[in-house]
Amino acid sequence: MLNHILSAFRTYMHGDGAVLLPEMQLFLFAIGTLAMDSWAANTSSEKLGTNSVFQQNYWNPAIALAGTAFSALTLWMLRARIMQSGDLAGFHLTLVVDSYFVFFSALFLAATALVILLSVNCSTISPVRQGRYFALLLFACMSMMLMVSAVDLVVIFLAMQAAAISAYFLAARPGVSNRTPSAAVRFLFSSALGSGLVVYGFSLLYGLSGDTNISQVARALGGRHNVAKVIALSRQSGQQGLQMFQLLQSRLPEAVHWHAFTPEALPIAAFMLVSVGMILKFAVPPFQTEFNHANGETDFGIPGPVILYLSGAFGFAAVALLLRLLFTIFADSQNIWWYIVAGMAIAGISYGVLATLRQTNLERIIVYLSIAQMSYVLLGVVAANEGAATAMTYYLLTYLFTVTGVFGILIAVRDKNTSAGALNDLSGLRQRSPVTALLLVVFVLSLTGVPPTAGFFGRYFIFHSLLETGHRYIAWFVVVSSLPLAYSYLRIAVYAWRGNKSETESAAVAFGVFEAIVLGICVFVSLAAGLYSEPFTRMARYAFGQ
Amino acid sequence: MPPVTHYLFLSFVLFFIGLTGVLSRRNLIVQLFSMEIILNAASVNFMAFARLYGDASGQVFSILVVAMLALELLVALVIIAAVCSRWKCATPDDAKDLSSQLDY
C-alpha cells in the first residue's frame, strides 16, 4: 500500500508536480509560518520562557526567507532541466515552465525576500501575529509565480484573483498607527473593477476562439487577422485585388461588404478590456486617491514594505502577464494596438511625472513615479523587437533593486522620527548619516537614469529600440520626459543633502543588519549593472529565450 | 434556443449597467454590487459561448467566476467592516448610517 502511494507520488513529481514545485514549496512554507505563529500565540509565555527564541520576532521571517530560498533553489534546478530538455508543460497544458517563467519567478522571489528583510525591524508593521503577514507575502509571491506560469485563461484568472486577495489583506492589515486604511479600500475597489474588466475581456477571447488555451486563442485571432488583411487587399484595384475579392466571395461571402477593421474590432475590444483591467488591478492607480488629504493625512496608512511590495512586485506581475498575453494572443495585430499601448504609456508617464511635482510625501513621490517607470517599460512593447524585449526585462530587473533601495532608506529614516514621511524629514541627512545620504543619491541617480548607474542603460535600451523600429517621436518623448522625472527624483537628493542637523533635531540614522544587507544588495546591483552591464543584459535576454 | 447574439446583448447591457454604477455612484456598497454585475455579465458570456461551441470549459470558467465573485465580495465586506469599525461608523449607537460615512 505504502509502496503504491510512494510510487504514485514519485510519478506525480516527475510529471505535473515538477511544473508546480517552486509554488508548492512556497505554499508549504507559508502554511508552516501560519502554524508556527498560531502555536506561539496559543502557548503561554511561561512555557516558552521569557527569553525564548519564539518570543522574538525573528522566527517568522526566518521561515518565510527559508521558503523563498528553497523555492529559488528549485527554480535553479528547473532552469538546468529546461536547458537540457526544453520547456516543461503540465496539468493539461495549463502551466508551463519556460525561461520567461524562470526569469520572472526569480524576480518575484528576490522582491519577496527583500521585502521580508525590510519588514523584520520595521516599526510600522504591527507585531501582533506577525506570522500572518509573512505568510501573506509568500502566498502573494506564489500567486504571482502562477500568473507567469499559466498559459490558460482560466488558470490566469484564478492566479490573478489569488494574488489580488493576498494584496487586499496585505494592504488592509491593521498597522501600528491609528490611521484609516483608506488607501486599502481604494485599492480593493479599483482592483475589483479591474478583475471585472479582465474577465469580460477573457469571455470575449473565449467567444472568439472557443478555447481557453492562449496559443489556441492566438491561432483563432491570427485567422481573423488574415481575413482582415484579405479584405484590405480585395479593395485594391488591379489583378491582385480582383483575385482577393474572388477568394473572399468563395470562402467567406458575408465578409465582402465588411470594412477591413471589422474582424479586428472584437479582438481589439478584448485587448482594451484586458490591458486596462490589468493595469487597474495591479498597477499603481489605487494609490492615486486624494482621499487621504481630505482627512488631513498625507501618507497611505500602509506600512512602507507593503507599499513597496504592492507598487513593485505587483506592478511587475501585471507587466509580465500583460507581456505574455501581448506577445502570444495579440501578436498578429501589433500594428493596430501599438497606438493604444503608446497612448497609455505616454499618458502614464505624463500623469506620474506631473502629479509628483507638488507632492511632499516621500512614499507618494516614489509611488507616483513608479507609474511613470512602468509606462517606460510598456513603451518597449511599442517597439516589439529583440532589443526591446531585452530592454524591458533589464529595466524591470534593475528597477526592482533601485526602488527597493530607496524604500529601504525611507523606511529607516521614517522609523527613527515616526513622522508622516514628508520630504522635510530628509533634511540634514548628510550630516546625520553621510553613508545613507550617499546611498540615497546613488539610488536616485539610478532611477533618474544618469550614466554610470543601472537606470541609464534601461532607459537607453528602450530609447534605442524605439529608434530602431522607426518610432522617432516616441523616442524623443522618452528623452524629453526624463527632464521633469529627473527634477522629481533629484528633489529628494537635494533635500537629503542640504539642511543642518540642528534644524531637524533628529537622531542619527542607524541601520539594523537586515536593512544593511538589503541596501548592500541594492546598491551593488544599481552600480554593477551600470558599470558592467554584460551579466545583467545576459540575464535579461534569457527571459525571452535568447 | 435563441441565437447567441441575444445573450451577448444581455451581457453587454449588464456590463454597461455595472460600469455606469461603478463610475457614477459614490457609495462603496453600491459600487461593489456594480462590480459584481460586471462579473455576472462575463459569466453570461461564458455560458452563451459554451453552449455555442458545445465546450465545457466555458461552463467551468463561469462557475469559477461565480466562486471568485463570492470570495471577492466576502473579502471586500470584511475590509469595509474593518474600516468602518476604525471609523466608528458601524456601531448601533452611531446615528449616522453606513452609506453616508462611506460616501466620499
Image (spheres, rainbow, N blue to C red):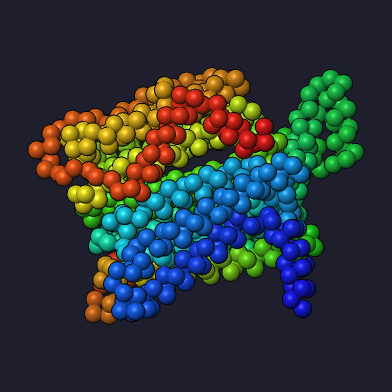
**Front-most of residues A377 and A262:** A377
**Front-most of residues A99 and A175:** A99
Left or right: A189 in relation to A487 = right
Residue A336 appears at what percent x and percent y?
64, 33
Left or right: A491 in relation to A333 = left
Question: Who's the residue at 78% across and 37% down the image?
Answer: A227
Image quadrant containing the N terminus of chain A: bottom right
**Residue B60 can be seen, yes or no:** yes
- Note whether A477 is above or below A102 in the view shown: above
Left or right: A233 in relation to A239 = left
Residue A82 appears at what percent x and percent y?
71, 44
Question: Who's the residue at 72% across and 67% down the image?
Answer: A9
Question: Who's the residue at 41% across and 59% down the image?
Answer: A61
**Front-most of residues A161 and B11:** A161
**Residue A201 can be seen, yes or no:** no
Image quadrant in which you'd find residue B41: bottom right
**Front-most of residues A397 and A336:** A397
